[in-house]
């Protein structure tokens, strides 16, 4: 089992700060790095810090390429709940990245399976992912890899679980508006990244964080696969770490 580095911070804002320092250092060390990015509430403070660092002249994203973990099926990039929209608004429009170097799975492709294959080919053409940022779902999902009998391999279409749709309904008018499917990088795609960075905050995540980092490696807890990866850093607040 590999040693997972865990950094603790007092609260979500402080987690964003220390995680951003690692991303800024990675970007400054490799100007054309491929960053795997994530959506959700947890990475928001981190993205705020990246914008701050850019504005302060501490970092430039001009040569950086990005690939996002996942996207809802059926939501276009102008839909406010699409992950492409989230990334544009919360990060890309506020830094000097070239938008044509940013990639999110295509949720509106007529042929979703072909879109998944194209996304894998894209990641390969970029030379693979240097650093993949991850959040974790209450059920242990990473990307939209939901608990399953086996670890998924590559980018694929998933049916979202009721628990995930329930957790995400806060962003939609009602649960009926939450998409039922998404395109997500597979566990294999994520695992192939050179470095994994997990951000996790809040007491409600304490139980799943503990199971993921210290329990059995089991596809029913998708994030548990992190225990087998050679380079994992976790940034979490004290509430999320309270059981570890
Ligand atoms: P959250 O989502 O950051 O909004 O809690 C994390 C996830 O579901 O991966």
Image: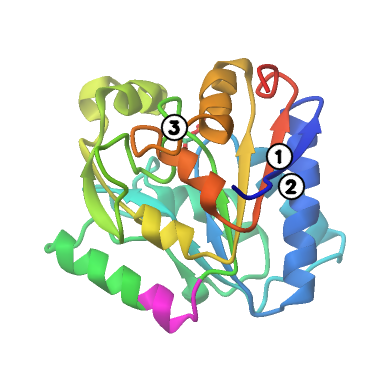
Q: Nearer the viewer, mark 2 or mark 3?
A: 3
Extreme residue in the front direction = 1
Q: Position of residue 83 (x, y in %)?
A: 41, 48
Colour theme: rainbow
Task: Measure the C-alpha gap from mark 1 to mark 3.
Answer: 16 Å
Q: Quadrant of residue 162?
A: top left
Q: Earlier in the sequence, mark 2 or mark 3?
A: 2
Is residue 124 rendered magenta in the image?
A: yes
Q: For the point 67% across and 63% down, which residue is it? A: 95
Q: Which residue is mark 1?
A: 235
Q: Position of residue 123 (x, y in %)?
A: 42, 73
Q: For the point 53% across and 61% down, which residue is it? A: 36
Q: Kindly state the secondary structure of the residue where label 3 is placed.
A: loop
Q: Kindly state the secondary structure of the residue where label 1 is placed.
A: strand
The residue at label 3 has a CB less than 8 Å from ligand 1: no
Tag 2 near tag 1, CB within 8 Å? yes
Extreme residue in the left direction = 110
Q: Earlier in the sequence, mark 2 or mark 1?
A: 2
Q: Which residues are magenta?
A: 122-128
Q: Which residue is mark 3?
A: 140
Q: Position of residue 125 (x, y in %)?
A: 42, 83
The residue at label 1 has a CB less than 8 Å from ligand 1: no
Residue count near mark 2 (Cα–Cα under 10 Å), binned few <14, some 14–19, many ≥20: many
Task: Measure the C-alpha gap from mark 2 to mark 3.
Answer: 20 Å
């Amino acid at each position: 089992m590999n040693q997972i580095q865990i950094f603790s911070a007092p609260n979500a804002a402080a987690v964003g700060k220390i995680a951003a320092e690692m991303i800024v250092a990675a970007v400054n060390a490799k100007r054309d790095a491929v960053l795997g990015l994530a959506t959700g509430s947890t990475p928001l403070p981190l993205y705020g810090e990246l914008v701050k660092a850019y504005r302060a002249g501490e970092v430039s994203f001009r040569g950086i390429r990005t690939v996002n973990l996942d996207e809802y099926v059926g939501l276009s990039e102008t839909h406010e709940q699409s992950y492409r929209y989230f990334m544009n608004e919360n990060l890309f429009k506020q830094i000097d990245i070239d938008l044509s170097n940013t990639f999110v799975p295509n949720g509106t492709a007529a042929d979703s399976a072909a879109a998944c294959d194209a996304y894998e080919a894209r990641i390969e053409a970029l030379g693979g992912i240097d650093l993949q940022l991850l959040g974790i779902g209450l059920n242990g999902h990473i990307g939209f890899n939901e608990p399953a009998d086996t670890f998924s391999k590559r980018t694929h279409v998933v049916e979202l679980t009721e628990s995930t749709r329930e957790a995400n309904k806060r962003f939609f008018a009602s649960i009926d508006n939450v998409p039922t499917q998404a395109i997500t990088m597979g566990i294999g795609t994520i695992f192939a990244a050179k470095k994994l960075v997990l951000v996790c905050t809040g007491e409600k995540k304490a139980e799943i964080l503990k199971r993921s980092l210290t329990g059995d490696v089991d596809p029913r807890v998708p994030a548990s696969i992190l225990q087998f990866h050679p380079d994992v850093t976790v940034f979490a607040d004290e509430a999320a770490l309270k059981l570890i």
